[in-house]
Image (cartoon, rainbow, N blue to C red):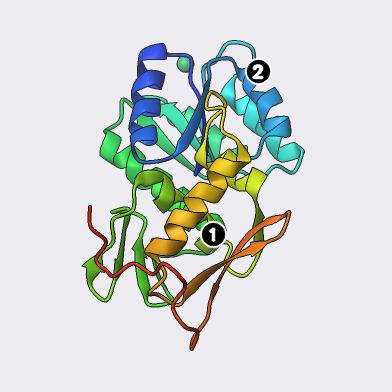
Amino acid sequence: MRILLVEDDPDLAEAVTRRLRRQGHAVDWQSDGRAAFEVLGYEPFDLLLLDIGLPGMDGLTLLTQLRRQGNKTPVLMLTARADIEDRVNALDVGADDYLDKPFDFRELDARCRALLRRPQGQASGVWEVGGLRIDSAARKVSWQGDDLDLPNREFSLLEVLVGRMGRVVSKEDIASRLFNFDEDVGLNAIEVYVGRLRKKLAMSQLRITTVRSVGYRADVQADVPAQEGAAVPPAQA
Ligand code: CA
């Protein structure tokens, strides 16, 4: 998923960015509130992690303006533990949740997961589709009880497609959710990832259809023969 972190403490920002990237998210970092607000004007994100005290524009003002523009990106506000007013203000201006600093990274993970599944109408974080069990907390996919070997990027791709089941997702949209600004990735890299994912899921009823010159669509199809190049689960590491 695509995450924007707006935080002016470089050590904290680096630690959060590293952790979220390791989980397969495409993370961009901005330290200035005004610069972040501009980026949010033209780039879609699945989640915004927003500090309050920021140079350029403070987090509460940023969020107020963002919501006024109709931007509904889920926002996790990073607040100061001692300051109850910050928390109340954050929720009042449209934050979806807050996390007190200093925080435990496991709590950050859990709150991020909860907010990332919200727009997809997911209550539990586990999908059962086409015979597959997709657990977004554990970042694991299994088929008939066997774990499949999906690297982070392929797992994220699966989440993006299954999160918008039955709808076409453009290659540009997929790229923006799998890669951050610094990763210069051509759209044919997306084709490669889709190709690998298709092979690994070929024994399931989940089908990833190419919609020519637009993108891809995931559907569950019963009674279709296995796709060419079907892998025999469990996939070897
Ligand atoms: Ca700060």
- Residue at (53% x, 15% y) in the render: 31
Where does the image place residue 102, in percent across and percent down from the top left?
31, 25
Quadrant for residue 177, please give it: top right
Name the residue furthest bottom.
Answer: 223
Label 2 environment density (alpha carbons within 10 Å; few <14, some 14–19, many ≥20): some
**Mark 2 and mark 1: Cα distance apart in space:** 30 Å
For label 1, the residue is: 161
At 52% from the left and 35% from the top, the residue drawn is 179
Residue under the image location 35 percent in, 14 percent down: 11
Percent position (x, y) of residue 18?
Answer: 35, 27
Residue 39 figure quarter: top right
Mark carried by residue 35: 2
Nearer to us of marks 2 and 1 is 1
Q: Nearer the viewer, residue 90 or 190?
A: 190
Residue 81 seen anywhere in this rendered image of the structure: no
Is residue 36 rendered to the left or right of residue 20?
Answer: right
Describe the element under mark 1 as helix, strand or loop.
Answer: helix
Q: Within 8 Å of ligand 1, the CB of disc 1?
A: no
Q: Position of residue 29 (x, y in %)?
A: 51, 23
Q: Nearer the viewer, residue 53 or 47?
A: 47
Looking at the image, which residue is at 70% across and 42% down? 71
